[in-house]
Image: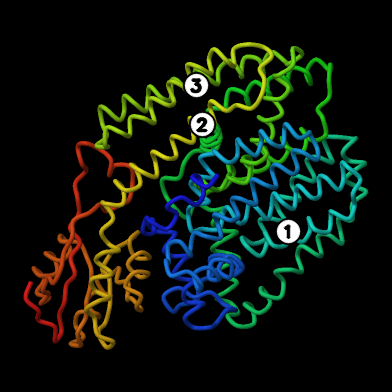
Amino acid sequence: MFIVLFWRLGVPTFWDPDEAHYAQTSRELIDTGDWQAPYYNEEPFFDKPILFHWLQAAPMSLLADPELGARFSPAVAGVLLVLTTWWIGVQLAGRRVGAVAALLLSVNPGLFALARYAILDTIFTAFLFGGLSLLAVAALRERPRLQYGGYVLIGMACFTKGPLALVLCGIVFAVVVAGSASLRRRLLTLQWMPGAVIAALLPFPWFVYMLWRFRGAFVSGYFLDENVLLYATPLYANQPPWWFYLGITATGLLPWTPLLIGRLVDHLRGWMRGASSLDPFDVILWAWTLTIVGFFSLSRFKLDHYVFPAAPALCLICARAWVDGQSASAGPGVRLGLRLIGPTLAVSGIGVGVFMVSRLNLPAAALSVAIALVAAGAWATWRYGRTPVSGAPALAIGALGVTYVGLVLFVMPAIERGKVVPDVAEWVAGRASATDRIATFRLNRWNPAYRFYVNRHTEMLESDEDARRFFSDPSPYYCVMTRPLYEALRAAGVPLVVAYGREGLWVTSGKALWREQPERTEFVVTTGGRHRPAP
C-alpha cells in the first residue's frame, strides 16, 4: 500500500489543470487567514464546499513540500477507504472476504490514480462509503448505534462535495427497499429521518454563511452552475456517450473484470430460475454499484473519476466471488471468471510489451512490467484454472504492484519532462518585482499550474479586448503565452520582448511517452512597459 499511495508522492509537479486549482485555493486559505470562504486567484471559488480545502490546507501548512502537502490528505483517505472495505467485508461476509477485498482495492487503478491526486474524490468516497458501511452493519447486524456514525460520515461527504452524497444514498435506499422485502424490514428499523437531519445539518451552517456573504453569486455559481446545470444540461461539447462509465468500470477493475461478470451472470441465472435469492449484503453492493454507474451515466457532463465511489463495492463483490470460488459449489460464471483472470493478465502484459517496444520511448527496464504481467498471467492461468482455488490472489496482486512501481519509476518522470509551465512560472517568480503585473494570455489548461508556481495574482487574459487593455497599460509586466500568440501580437504592433522560453507539451498526456513525439509548444515569457531586458 505504501507504493500505491505514498511512494514519491510529492515528486511530480501538479498535473494540469485540477490539482493546481485546488491546491492554490487551499493555499489562499492559509495565506489570507480566511478559512470560511474558498478563493482562487483572489476571487471567490464556488466549485465545492470548503471541507476538502480545510483537510488539504492543514498538511500544506505543516509540510515544506507543497505537492506532498496537497496530496497527503487524499492519500490518507485512500488508506482509510481500504480499511473501511476490509471492516465491512469482515463484518458482513467474513475475514477472508474482508482481507481479499482490501487487497483488491489497494491495487485498484482508480485508488492509485486518485489517492495520489490532489483533488477531493478519494476523501469524498472515504466519507460516503464509510457512512454506507456503518448503516449496512447497523441494519444487518442489529447494531443500531453505528447508524449515527454513518449519518455523520454522510454529512461529511455532503460537506466535501455537496448534496450529491444525500442524493446517492437516497437512491440506494429507495432501490434496496423496493427490491428486497428482507432488507426493507431491517432498513426501516433505522432512524432515517433524524439521520437525514444530522447529515444535512453538518454542512448547513457553511451554506447559510456563503449565502449571506455572497448572496446571488453563490446561488448561481454553486447551486446552478456546479450542480444542476452541470448535470442536466450540455454545457460542454464532445462529451462521452451514455455507456462511457461501463467501459471505465470494466477497465478499472482489471484483471478481476471476468470474475465480476461471472458473479453477475450467476446471480442473474439464479434470479431468473427462482432457484436462489441474493444475500442481503450482495443486494446492497449491487444497488450501490448500479446507482453510482447509472446516476453518472445520465449526467450530461462526464469525467472518468466520477464513478470511483463504486470501486469498494466492486472489490467486495469480486472478493466474495473469489472466496466462493474456493468451493466446489461455485457457480459456473464464477468458475469461468476465475479461469479468465490469468489469461487477462497475460494478454494485458503482451499488449503492454508490444506497445512499449513499438511506440513508447521508455528505458528497457520498463519492460519488466510487461514481463511480470505475462509471467503472473501464465502462472495464474494454471493456478486459478483448478477448482477449488485457495488462498489470496497473490499472483495478480503482485503483478499489479510491479506495474505501479514501473509507473512511478519510468512513466511519471517521462511525462514530467513535458511539463514546462511550472518551471516558467518559477522563473518569473524569481525575477518579478512586487509592482510588476503578472499575466497569461490564452494559456488555457496551464493557467492553474502557472498561478500556483508563480505564487502571485495573475491576470488570465482570454479575449482580444483583455489583451488590448492589458498591453496598453505602460506599467511593467511579465506575460506568458505560446510562441504563435507572441508572433501574432508582435505583428499587430504590440512591443513585446521575449525574456525566457521553454518547449513542452500543450496538454499533459501519455503522448509524452511516444517515440514519435507530438509537436511541442514553445511557451515564452514576454515583457513590456518599462521592462526592456535583452532576450
- Measured as percent of width and height from the top left, residue 412 is found at 35, 47
- Dot 2 and dot 3 residues touching (CB under 8 Å): no
Q: Which mark is residue 344?
A: 3
Q: Which mark is residue 398?
A: 2
Looking at the rendered structure, the kind of residue marked 1 is Leu
501 horizontally vs 439: left or right = left
Determine the secondary structure under disc 2. Answer: helix
- Measured as percent of width and height from the top left, residue 283 is found at 78, 34
Q: In front: 135, or 484?
A: 135
Of badges 2 and 1, nearer the viewer stands 2
Q: In front: 402, or 501?
A: 402
Q: Is residue 149 above or below residue 366?
A: below
Mark 1 lies on residue: 153
**Within 10 Å of the Cα at label 2, are there few (<14), some (14-19), or many (20+) other Cα atoms?**
some
8 horizontally vs 193: left or right = left
**Cα distance, mark 2 to mark 3?**
15 Å
* Quadrant assignment, res 467: bottom left
> In which quadrant will I find the C terminus?
bottom left
Looking at the rendered structure, the kind of residue marked 2 is Gly
**Cα distance, mark 1 to mark 3?**
37 Å
* Quadrant assignment, res 77: bottom right
324 horizontally vs 405: left or right = right
Q: Which mark is residue 50?
A: none
Residue furthest left in the image: 534
> In which quadrant will I find the N terminus?
top right
